Amino acid sequence: MTSGNGVAGLLLPDEVLVVDVGPRDGLQNEARPVSAAEKIALINGLARAGIRRIEATSFVSPKAVPQMADAAEVMAGIDRVAGVEYAVLVPNVRGLERALAAGAGIVNVVVVATETFNHRNVNMSVAESMAAFDTITREARTAGVPVSAVLGAAFVCPFEGSVPAEQVLGLVEQFAQTGITELTLADTIGAAHPAQVARLVTAIRERWPHLALGLHLHDTRGLGLANALAAVTAGVTRLEASVGGIGGCPFAPGATGNASTEDLVFMLEAMGVHTGISLEALIAVAQSVPAIVGHPVSSKMLAAGPPRPAPPAKTQT
Ligand code: COA
Ligand code: ZN
């Protein structure tokens, strides 16, 4: 983290890991069935565009999320591009076993911060999910696969409203006790605002400076990129978005699209924050998304394209 890049008053990191969660968070919410072949092509396109971590699918109950029933087929069909981490989401030990058998590179395990939402999501209390998290973490560690903790609805819950910071910090404490090194705060219903993001990130970094923090962004109320900026200036090193801006949670009313990955990459690269991603190649992948999901998507980069670059500086003769 340096301030070498940036204007006075805006401390920006030199680089950020941009994670695309479109193949999972994006496609889990689509009514129209998407074939495994289309998912595989999407994931391969993202990898080739330079996305270094992709949430490829989830190993959840096909009754809960039928759109992810083909998780094993998708994982078996993708190219494993060197340098790309293929993450998957799991809700329980059964999911972990399926994920390990499929060769998942990282296992994302979610606990939602509030009882009502966690129950709707995984039919468990928060304490039961935390216990499952502990077991999954130990089994994954034995198998040599890293676990990434995700705290769902870390800011606002669609059922219980604003989530008190003390409640979140109590859950982070429980996560920390399992020895995790990575935590993602999820704004699952896109209701957080930048000051709330900066405050929570700062409070967590003060108490658990070793935790690599990520922010899972939704743009439901138009604050996705504002929250991303607040997060990186507060010390978040990983941002999760979705190609085309598709996404949402089937268990949360009104939870629409993620922040679009190409819009996020445009903002970061324009500010000199390195992502390693080719915006041009990513926009080309995003162009395939409306046909896959069968409706227009919210991406600004798809609508407007990147601005014309500045002309090369004239050299003095
Ligand atoms: N993968 C595949 N199948 C699974 C599974 C998994 N990880 N976990 C459970 N199942 C199956 C069971 O075998 C059972 O099948 P059956 O009825 O044919 O016997 C069925 O799903 C129900 O299992 P049960 O253990 O009773 O779970 P549940 O009904 O209480 O549901 C979850 C709990 C966690 C499995 C389910 O709520 C879930 O998958 N949630 C995922 C939510 C999600 O993806 N949210 C979005 C991302 S945060
Ligand atoms: Zn999400």
Image: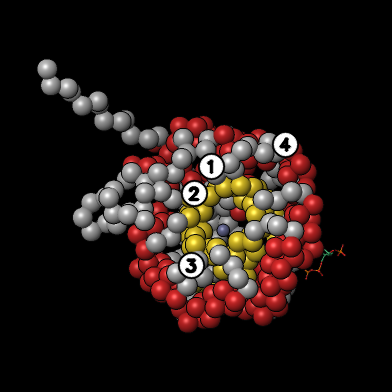
When the figure is inspected, residue 141 is found, relative to residue 273, above or below; the finding is: below
Report helix, strand or loop for mark 4. helix
Badge 1 or badge 3: first in the primary sequence: 1
Report helix, strand or loop for mark 2. strand
Q: Which amino acid, by three-letter code, is at mark 3?
A: His
State the CA–CA distance, disc 1 to disc 2. Answer: 7 Å
Percent of width and height locating residue 235: 39, 61
- Quick check: which quadrant has ligand 2? bottom right
Quarter of the image for the C terminus: give it.
top left
Q: Residue at x 40, y 34 (%)?
A: 305
Q: Which amino acid, by three-letter code, is at mark 1?
A: Ile
Label 1 belongs to which residue?
A: 51
Confirm or deny contact between disc 1 and disc 3 (CB under 8 A): no
Between 69 and 7, which is closer to the camera in this rendering?
7
Badge 4 or badge 2: first in the primary sequence: 2
Q: Residues within 10 Å of mark 4 (few under 14, many from 20)?
A: few
Q: Residue at x 66, y 35 (%)?
A: 41
Q: Residue at x 51, y 54 (%)?
A: 240
In this view of the protein, can residue 223 be seen by the observer?
no
Label 4 belongs to which residue?
A: 37
State the CA–CA distance, disc 3 to disc 4. Answer: 39 Å
Q: Nearer the viewer, mark 1 or mark 3?
A: 3
Confirm or deny contact between disc 3 and disc 4 (CB under 8 A): no
Percent of width and height locating residue 153: 54, 69
Label 2 belongs to which residue?
A: 18
Report helix, strand or loop for mark 3. loop
Residue 277 horizontal side relative to residue 25, left or right = left
Badge 3 or badge 4: first in the primary sequence: 4
Label 3 belongs to which residue?
A: 210
Percent of width and height locating residue 12: 33, 54
Q: Nearer the viewer, mark 2 or mark 3?
A: 3
